[in-house]
RNA sequence: GGUCCGUUCGUCUAGGGGUUAGGACACCAGAUUUUCAUUCUGGUAACACGGGUUCGAUUCCCGUACGGACUACCA
């Protein structure tokens, strides 16, 4: 097997889509598994769509999820430069070679002429008009124009493009690693533009030339490229690179969670989940899209989730570290069908990864939130809270979001709990409990529990009946972690103060 | 419209000529828990349809339907 060299080749036209991250991941896994090379190349041949900051964003995103680039943008390498705009001068020679070999030609048609041709064909009943082996005979190109006129036009710097001369009748075959043999008839491929009039190559030429020059062994990319893959095969053939042609693997697309269609930013916005790894501010519109990182997703969890979107190991194991993924991954086990994107699964993975973290790390998450709120808290106390909250957290920010009551006494009490559980018995027990706590010498969870049980049994009221009331008086809510531990953490004085406040501010609704 | 790709529980999927069609998420129920969550146990739920081939098809073949991608001097 030849040396594995794969590439992730995004266009810097905006933030990196989550589907792009998956594509990068699969490339990376293959490279690592075979001790190969992961290359990052930027395909910025369309200068009109260039977005400032996009390239840096892509770099940061890959770094955050733990995909390391061995060669290319940001790290350099033997095939530098890795930005296609900077490789501009390298492409023309190959286009010229194709012309010399009779596989390409100059075309001088203006936009208006092309438009007129399409109109003409449409009115004649052709659904999708193409510049191809038939129509090119009626256009202004080096195949129809006399040689000296072509030279004259070129000498006069007339704008032109170079088009591939696709044969009229030929079966183009391609063995995709995921889909098997894909056959396309050349009559369905149009004479694609290879060099644009601004001197830049199109995707097709640049991609093939760079993959060849960079000795790419596997092209792993989205399914949207499958229709143009036969064209690329033709290009390799005409350029004389058939033996160096990489293997292709076209990944199934990520689909909308509900309904149909390709997953888009719009869907993500509507359903309230991130679509970009990192928060992205669109430099043109100023719109801000919150990223996975900022939403509290852990990079390992996101990677695990993404890896399973279209791939599975064939076993029941679901939690995979990057290392395990590298060992287990295989292109053969990538599915063919499009995958609906389900954010619930991502949340589940996040929860799993969060729980697996050491307590100290969890405590730090809480401490970070507290710092932003300007609240002092010892590491020990934060750890205690984190341990208590662990089982109910999905995101790091949950420790604060669901544990505010540890630091702020409630001033509002959950209505439904109050109306159902706040009654005369509750008031009696809370009053007695509070008085008992005041006199307690040492106070911790055990003392709290013993005290409460003593009070309830003395009064002859079931403990279960008033627990909710006690909880709401201490935390404001009807649900939460172990109450006795909460009391230990907030401390004796706070317990007394909070119960007092609740007693004075909650009216008895039910007798 | 044309070309190409696809179709197993609601979702992600395993499987593959003869299986009680397996797992996970979600959902529901029960148990545990002072509540919620966790945990445990159990449950509902799928081979798109029609023809072949075959003793037998969810699995192979062909159609149909449905879905998706592509159809630019964008990638």
Image: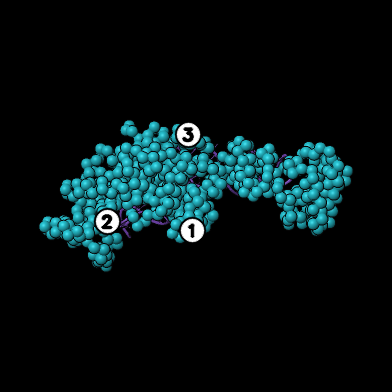
Chain colours: A cyan, B purple
| Count of numbered circles on the image | 3
For the residues labelled 1 and 3, the Cα–Cα distance comes to 36 Å
Q: Is residue A26 visible?
A: yes
- Residues under numbered marks 1 and 3 in contact, where contact means CB atoms less than 8 Å apart: no
Which residue is the site of mark 1?
A287
For the residues labelled 2 and 3, the Cα–Cα distance comes to 45 Å
- Of badges 1 and 3, nearer the viewer stands 1
Label 3 crowd (10 A; few <14 / some 14-19 / many >=20): few
Residue at position x 73%, y 50% in the image: A409
- Of badges 2 and 3, nearer the viewer stands 2
- Residues under numbered marks 2 and 3 in contact, where contact means CB atoms less than 8 Å apart: no
Which residue is the site of mark 3?
A323
Residue at position x 28%, y 51% in the image: A201
Q: Quadrant of the C terminus of chain A?
A: bottom right
Question: Residue A191 — which label?
Answer: none
Circles 1 and 3 on the same chain: yes
């Amino acid at each position: 097997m030849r040396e594995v060299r794969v590439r992730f080749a995004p266009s810097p036209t905006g933030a990196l889509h989550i589907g792009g991250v998956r594509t990068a991941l699969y490339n990376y896994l293959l490279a690592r598994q075979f001790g190969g090379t992961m290359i990052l190349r930027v395909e910025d041949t369309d200068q009109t769509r260039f977005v400032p900051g996009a390239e840096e964003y892509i770099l940061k995103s890959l770094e955050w999820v733990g995909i390391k680039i061995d060669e290319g943008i940001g790290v350099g390498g033997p095939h530098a430069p890795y930005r296609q705009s900077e490789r501009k001068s390298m492409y023309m020679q190959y286009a010229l070679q194709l012309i010399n070999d009779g596989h390409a030609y100059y075309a001088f048609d203006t936009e208006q002429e092309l438009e007129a041709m399409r109109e003409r064909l449409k009115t004649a009943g052709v659904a999708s008009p193409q510049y191809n082996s038939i129509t090119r005979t009626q256009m202004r190109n080096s195949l129809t124009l006399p040689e000296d006129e072509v030279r004259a036009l070129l000498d006069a710097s007339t704008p032109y493009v170079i088009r591939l001369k696709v044969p009229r009748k030929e079966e183009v075959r391609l063995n995709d690693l995921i889909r098997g043999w894909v056959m396309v008839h050349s009559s369905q491929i149009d004479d694609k533009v290879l060099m644009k009039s601004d001197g830049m190559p199109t995707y097709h030429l640049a991609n093939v030339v760079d993959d060849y020059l960079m000795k790419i062994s596997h092209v792993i990319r989205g399914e949207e490229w499958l229709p143009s893959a036969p064209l690329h095969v033709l290009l390799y053939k005409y350029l004389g690179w058939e033996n160096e042609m990489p293997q292709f693997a076209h990944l199934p697309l990520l689909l909308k969670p509900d309904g149909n269609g390709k997953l888009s930013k719009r869907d993500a916005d509507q359903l309230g989940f991130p679509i970009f790894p990192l928060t992205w501010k669109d430099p043109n519109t100023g719109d801000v899209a919150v990223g996975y990182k900022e939403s509290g997703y852990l990079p390992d969890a996101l990677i695990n989730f993404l890896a399973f979107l279209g791939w599975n190991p064939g076993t029941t194991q679901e939690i995979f570290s990057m290392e395990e993924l590298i060992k287990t991954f295989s292109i053969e086990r990538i599915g063919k069908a499009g995958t609906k994107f389900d954010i619930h699964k991502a949340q589940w993975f996040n929860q799993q990864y969060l729980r697996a973290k050491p307590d100290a790390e969890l405590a730090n998450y809480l401490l970070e939130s507290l710092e932003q709120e300007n609240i002092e808290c010892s590491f020990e106390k934060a750890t205690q809270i984190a341990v208590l909250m662990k089982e109910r957290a999905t995101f790091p920010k949950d420790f604060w979001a669901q544990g505010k009551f540890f630091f702020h006494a409630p001033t509002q009490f959950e209505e439904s709990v109050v109306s159902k559980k706040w009654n005369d018995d509750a008031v009696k027990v809370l009053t007695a409990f509070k008085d008992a706590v005041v006199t307690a010498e040492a106070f911790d969870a055990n003392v709290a529990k013993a005290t409460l049980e003593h009070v309830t049994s003395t009064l002859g009221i079931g403990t279960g009946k008033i627990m909710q009331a006690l909880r709401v008086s201490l935390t404001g809510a009807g649900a939460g972690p172990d109450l006795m531990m909460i009391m230990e953490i907030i401390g004796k004085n706070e317990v007394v103060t909070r119960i007092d406040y609740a007693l004075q501010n909650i009216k008895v609704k039910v007798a």
